Image (spheres, grey):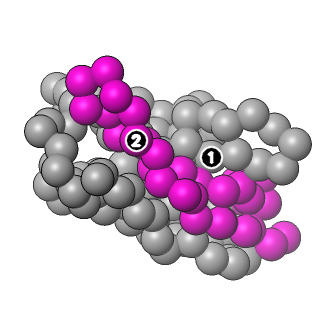
Amino acid sequence: QVQVLESGGGLVQAGGSLRLSCVVSGSIPTINYKGWYRQAPGKQRELVAEIETAGITNYANSVKGRFTISAANARTMFLQMNSLKPEDTAVYYCKIESGRTEYWGQGTQVTVSS
């Protein structure tokens, strides 16, 4: 059984930083995609940052220059979030893909106070 577990969320003041982690466990042949998504109350889930197969990274315009996605290995991913803003408040989810199968974590809450 594949499990995706996020950690590192919390409460931080505007301008502060947080580092989210995502760890994948279980039997999974390959991981061809890793990404971070977020969902704020009353809003749709949106892409924050992703790493594609070739190592290409993409970011939402709203986080460019502030957030950095990285991977320690195939099963561990991070999201370094700097200069946080109140509008970054959301539940942050880790998503991976193996072939055409998607796996999501349960999410970690990030709250940025003004």
Q: Could you say where residue 30 lies in the image, as x and y percent from the top left?
A: 14, 36
Picture layout, residue 3 above or below residue 61:
below
Secondary element at image label 1: strand
Q: Which residue is mark 2?
A: 103
Label 2 CA crowd tier, 10 Å (few <14, some 14–19, many 20+): some
Left or right placement of residue 94 versus residue 3 in this view: right
The amino acid pointed to by label 2 is: Tyr
Secondary element at image label 2: strand
- Viewer-side label of 2, 1: 2
Q: Earlier in the sequence, mark 2 or mark 1?
A: 1
Q: What range is drawn magenta here?
A: 85-114
- Residue toward you, 23 or 20: 23
Residue at coordinates 17% horizontally, 26% vertically from top-left? 54
Q: Is residue 78 visible?
A: no
Extreme residue toward the front, this view: 1
Q: Could you say where residue 8 lies in the image, as x and y percent from the top left?
A: 49, 73
Residue at coordinates 75% horizontally, 34% vertically from top-left? 44
Answer whether residue 103 is magenta in the image.
yes
Q: Which residue is mark 1?
A: 38
Q: Is residue 84 visible?
A: yes
